[in-house]
Amino acid sequence: MKMRFSSVPGRGLAALGLAAVLLTTSGSNLNAASADSSNALVGVWSIQVTLRNCATGAPLGAPINSLVSFHQGGTMTETPGGQAFAPGQRSDGHGLWSKKDGHTYRQTFIALLNFDTPPNLPGTPTFDPSRPVSPGFFAGWQTVTHTLQLDDADHVSSEGTNAFYRTDGTVYRTGCSTAVGERFK
């Protein structure tokens, strides 16, 4: 399979380079997970993400289910649910996590957006009720950064931000979210 980041020479490499920088510089010691309580997060989690208005904290729609796996050594994978993305449009997320203080962790990940889709929003002239509601997306990538709190051995809560980038590296949308999760057993 051949991956294509951009049809403009140099932009695809810039996007790939920026993604690599985001993953390698987004926090101190993200690759290290010690053998003690730092690994308490390791495992598979069922997560419910709520998109939020960054200014007010008000929810923007119903929660979105996803699966997140925190791997020993400080890497993670994320598989989103929901219907805002067209089938095959968004890749799984790949990223890093690290222990902060106490029961607090940091996660950051990136996912590719493989093609553009137009918005489909209620109240607009082009709204099609037979299609999922979506703000529309451009090909490029998405980053997500959250601070997680391990509430107990089997429950986690978090909050953070996300950003969407076009293939040329320009940000076209940012947002906030919270999440709650339960360990899969």
Image (cartoon, rainbow, N blue to C red):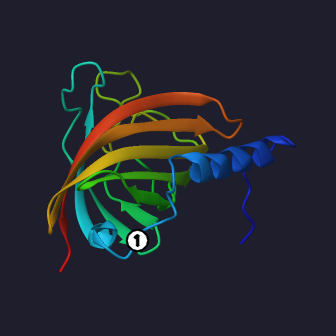
**Residue sitting at 83 percent across and 40 percent down?**
8
Which quarter shows the C terminus?
bottom left
- Residue at 41%, 58% (x, y): give it: 98
- Asked if residue 178 shows in the view, the reply is yes
**Of all residues shown, which one is farthest toward the top?**
55
Q: Nearer the viewer, residue 171 or 7?
A: 171
**Left or right: where does residue 123 sit relative to residue 170?**
left
The residue beneath circle 1 is 34
Instruction: Choose top left, top right, bottom left or bottom right for residue 76.
Output: bottom left
Tell me if 182 is positioned left or right of 14 in this view: left
The location of residue 83, given as percent across then percent down, is 34, 51
> Position of 19 compared to 123: left or right?
right
Q: Residue at x 33, y 71 (%)?
A: 39
Work out whether 171 lies above or below 23.
above
As drawn, 60 above or below 12: above
Residue depicted at x 48% and y 59%: 96
- Amino acid, disc 1: Ser
Please provide percent x and percent y for residue 18: 68, 44
Residue 153, given in percent of the width and then of the height, sits at 15, 68
Question: What is the quadrant of the N terminus in the image?
Answer: bottom right
Instruction: Count all numbered tags in the image, as a single digit.
Output: 1
Q: Is residue 47 left or right of residue 93?
A: left
Toward the viewer: 8 or 83?
Answer: 8
